[in-house]
Amino acid sequence: MRNKWLGSLALVCVTFMQFSCGGCGGGAEDDIKFIPGDDMSSQDVNYNSDAMNEVIASFSSPVEMAALLKDSGVEFSPKYLTNPEKVKDYTSSFKKALGLGVLSADLGYLNVYSKTSMILDYLVSIRQLTDDLKLGQFFDFQSLKSLATSNDNIDSLLVMCVQSYQNMDEHLRNNQRSNLSALLVTGVWVESLYLITQVAKEQPKDTRFRETIGEQKGILNNLLPILKLFKETDKKFEELVQNLEELKDVLDVVKITVHIDENTEVRKDGVIEQNEYSVVEVSDEELQEIITTAEKIRNKIVN
């Protein structure tokens, strides 16, 4: 999807949520009422925003992941998606933030395959979650519904969303709710990985899927330290971190080798650089372990 950094930073906006700068002030926070018994508003952990931006920039957005599947000739299948009706059963902000990330990834998949009728169902559930998380003040449902059902303006939408995620993340961190931002990103990543591993389970010989799955090794290595910060103050993060550490153990065996093409040089900003490329090696056994573990973690999140 054009420049990778652009598509990656747009992962939240794949949900077609527009976080306006006008909603980033402190006044809206005065009206927030949190879920009874839910302590997700009292977290005082602040991760380095640069660290999270690095995580986001390093992995493909749901739109990119779905585009890979479609370009590879994979038929659309609703069985890969979570049921948007499940959000009615999410009773904590922890669950809602993860669920919002999951639905974001699913919506990217639906948009690439132009499943307009299903998109509207997902937008309704996304709107419910954003309202419950007190992010509804940033949500222009009518405008976003129009964007979601048209691929004509996808480039301008992605550009707009680079700043959108940063606005939301800053808003959450300033109000000691950075844990929700971390959970949202985690939900997007887990569901995106689940989608491509489910396809790889049916087409295990496709090297493009194997390489993309293997590349998640580095992304998880960057994401886990951020989630561990919240584990120290919030017991809800313990199981999530434990599950992702299990996935990390499986991904750690993937071999990624960086090669330098000594015969080719490119000029970048007046500097001569050698081209680098990576070779990702995932055995049949490793692939099956990753598929099984990713499926287990994802199903725990949505059920």
Image (cartoon, rainbow, N blue to C red):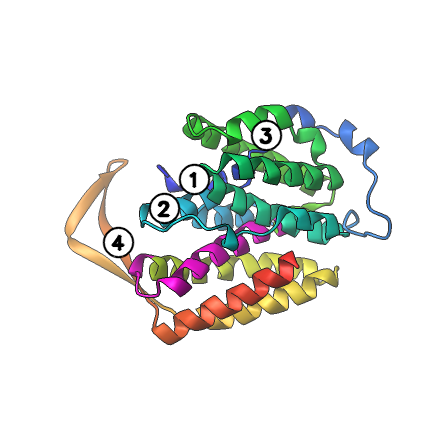
Residue 245 part of the magenta segment: no
Span highlighted in magenta in the image: 183-208
Q: Which residue is mark 3?
A: 18
Circles 2 and 1: CB atoms closer than 8 Å: yes
Q: CA distance from mark 4 to mark 1?
A: 30 Å
Task: Work out whether mark 4 precedes mark 3 in sequence or the reverse, and give the earlier one.
Answer: 3
Kind of residue indicated by mark 1? Val
Q: Which mark is residue 24?
A: none
Q: Which mark is residue 112?
A: 1
Please tell me which residue lies in front, 183 or 113: 113
| Image quadrant where residue 1 sits | top left
Mark 1 surroundings within 10 Å by alpha-carbon count, few (fewer than 14), some (14 through 19), many (20 or more):
some
Residue 276 location (% of width, % of height): 26, 54
Residue 232 location (% of width, % of height): 71, 63
Q: Is residue 26 above or below residue 102?
A: above
Task: Work out whether mark 2 precedes mark 3 in sequence or the reverse, and give the earlier one.
Answer: 3
Q: Which mark is residue 276?
A: 4
Q: CA distance from mark 2 to mark 4?
A: 27 Å
Kind of residue indicated by mark 2? Lys
Kind of residue indicated by mark 3? Gln
Q: Which residue is mark 2?
A: 70
Circles 4 and 3: CB atoms closer than 8 Å: no
Outermost residue to the bottom? 285
Kind of residue indicated by mark 4? Glu
Q: CA distance from mark 4 to mark 3?
A: 36 Å
Which label lies toward us, 4 or 3?
3
Mark 4 surroundings within 10 Å by alpha-carbon count, few (fewer than 14), some (14 through 19), many (20 or more):
few
User: What's the magenta bit mostly, secondary-structure-wise?
Assistant: helix
Which label lies toward us, 4 or 1?
1
Q: CA distance from mark 2 to mark 3?
A: 26 Å
Please tell me which residue lies in front, 52 or 269: 52
